[in-house]
Image: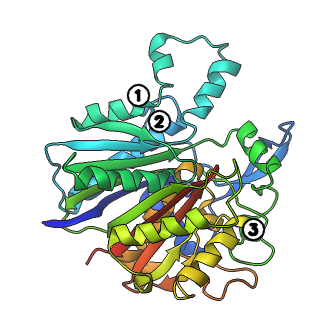
């Protein structure tokens, strides 16, 4: 069935909850964070940190690294899921892969353990194109394949790009991936020093989006895959449209004037051919930082006159960096399928439209915002499948 809309018809997820979309969904519904305590963090490597880290697993034949195995596992799950839901690949299947710090663990080992010396075959596995090329080979896909990166907005950026490819007939179907397994001690420490990552307490205590007392976000990892098609028999959700922009203001801060953030939201609504009164939910970037809370609260209060309900899954899933938006879109799409909003439980007074834990999902549109470090603004409009 060709609906004319870009539909999410297959989902695969590897997260701190485990190696499947089902494990992530059950984890979100439990209301318990994916994070656990890990040793070997801090500036001297002698501290523990709360991290929503992807556990060891996957198929060793998919690659030497957790990142390669997670990406291939998520893609395989999404493609299998789509097939079970009635999807048949078209003649030109493309692949888009969103990432920010690809293969950071293997690059770390390359320099610190191997002294910059590896066999050529092993060295090629460090290239961000290699996992994508191997996936294309596995399934015999021959459409275009490329990587996209827009910091924490990479997931939304990839979906907007995917929709352009489908709308222009550039591809018949598309597999979109977002991978970020980058919680090395050095990377975690720098986010802590920047004052945004909270690793010294339970995530529900430290990360309180739109609530009093929030200190920032718990860091996480994930690999997420979607099969995107206009020919979907039983899809999870539709992607109606989206928009991207850049503040060009500061390397870490959101422009407090919000001119470009607000315009990005309005452009996304226009691209989706919907109005401000059509949005029922804000699936927020929601990292629990003061500046992001202020910006997204103002979007709800001023652009949408306080109508949409707000939720963020970052207190549960962790902030999965380059894969963050994709994790949160997967949560929204599964929510439409299961008629449930997988909101995190609240722990303190907050915004009056903030949802408190698991809530029945009404068949209303969702605005998914993601704000990437450096000024990347993004917004995507999601709809129920039917």
x%, y% of residue 125?
Answer: 47, 24
Front position among marks 2 and 3: 3
Q: Secondary structure at mark 3?
A: helix
Q: Alpha carbon of mark 2 to alpha carbon of mark 3: how far?
A: 34 Å
Q: Secondary structure at mark 2?
A: helix
Res 68 label: 2
Res 194 label: none
| Label whose residue precedes the other's in the sequence (2 or 3) | 2
Q: What residue do we see at 46% from left, 38% from top?
A: 69
**Quick one: 267 or 209, which is closer to the camera?**
267
Is the Cβ of the residue at disc 2 closer than 8 Å to that at disc 1?
yes
Mark 2 residue crowding within 10 angstroms, few (<14) / some (14–19) / many (20+): many
Can residue 18 be seen? no
Q: Give the colouring mode of the picture.
A: rainbow
Front position among marks 1 and 3: 3
Q: Alpha carbon of mark 1 to alpha carbon of mark 3: how far?
A: 38 Å
Relative to 377, 195 lies left or right: right
Front position among marks 2 and 1: 1
x%, y% of residue 360?
Answer: 46, 86
Q: Which residue is mark 1?
A: 130
**Quick one: 358 or 297, which is closer to the camera?**
297
Mark 3 residue crowding within 10 angstroms, few (<14) / some (14–19) / many (20+): some
* Placement of the C terminus among the 4 image quadrants: bottom left
**Quick one: 187 or 369, which is closer to the camera?**
369
| Label whose residue precedes the other's in the sequence (1 or 3) | 1
x%, y% of residue 374?
Answer: 64, 49
Q: What residue do we see at 30% from left, 53% from top?
A: 164
Q: Alpha carbon of mark 2 to alpha carbon of mark 1: how far?
A: 9 Å
* Placement of the N terminus among the 4 image quadrants: bottom left
Res 290 label: 3
């Amino acid at each position: 069935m060709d609906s004319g809309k870009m539909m999410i018809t297959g989902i695969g997820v590897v997260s701190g909850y485990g190696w499947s979309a089902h494990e992530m969904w059950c984890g979100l519904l439990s209301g318990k964070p994916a994070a656990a305590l890990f040793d070997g963090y801090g500036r001297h490597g002698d501290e523990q940190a709360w991290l929503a880290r992807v556990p060891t697993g996957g198929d060793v034949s998919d690659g030497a690294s957790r990142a390669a195995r997670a990406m291939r596992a998520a893609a395989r799950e999404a493609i299998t899921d789509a097939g079970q839901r009635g999807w048949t690949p078209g003649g030109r299947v493309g692949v888009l892969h969103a990432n920010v710090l690809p293969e950071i663990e293997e690059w770390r080992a390359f320099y610190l353990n191997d002294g910059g010396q590896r066999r050529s075959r092993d060295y090629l596995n460090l290239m961000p194109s290699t996992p994508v090329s191997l996936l294309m080979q596995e399934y015999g896909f021959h459409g275009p394949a490329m990587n996209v990166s827009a910091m924490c907005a990479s997931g939304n950026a990839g979906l907007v790009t995917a929709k352009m490819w489908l709308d222009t007939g550039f591809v018949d179907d598309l597999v979109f991936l977002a991978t970020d397994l980058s919680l090395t001690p050095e990377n975690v420490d720098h986010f802590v020093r920047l004052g945004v990552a909270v690793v010294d307490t339970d995530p529900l205590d430290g990360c309180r989006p739109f609530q009093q007392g929030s200190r920032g976000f718990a860091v996480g990892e994930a690999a997420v895959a979607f099969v995107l098609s206009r020919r979907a028999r039983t899809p999870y959700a539709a992607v109606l449209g989206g928009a991207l922009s850049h503040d060009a203001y500061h390397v870490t801060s959101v422009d407090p004037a919000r001119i470009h953030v607000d315009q990005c939201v309005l452009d996304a609504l226009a691209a989706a051919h919907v109005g401000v009164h059509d949005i029922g939910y804000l699936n927020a970037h929601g990292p629990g930082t003061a500046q992001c809370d202020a910006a997204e609260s103002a979007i709800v209060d001023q652009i949408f006159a306080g109508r949409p309900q707000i939720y963020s899954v970052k207190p549960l899933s962790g902030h999965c960096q380059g894969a963050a938006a994709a994790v949160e879109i997967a949560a929204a799409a599964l929510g439409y399928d299961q008629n449930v909003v997988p909101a995190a439980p609240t722990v303190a007074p907050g915004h009056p439209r903030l949802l408190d834990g698991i809530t029945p999902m009404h068949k209303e549109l969702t605005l998914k915002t993601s704000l990437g470090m450096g000024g990347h603004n993004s917004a995507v409009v999601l709809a129920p499948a039917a």
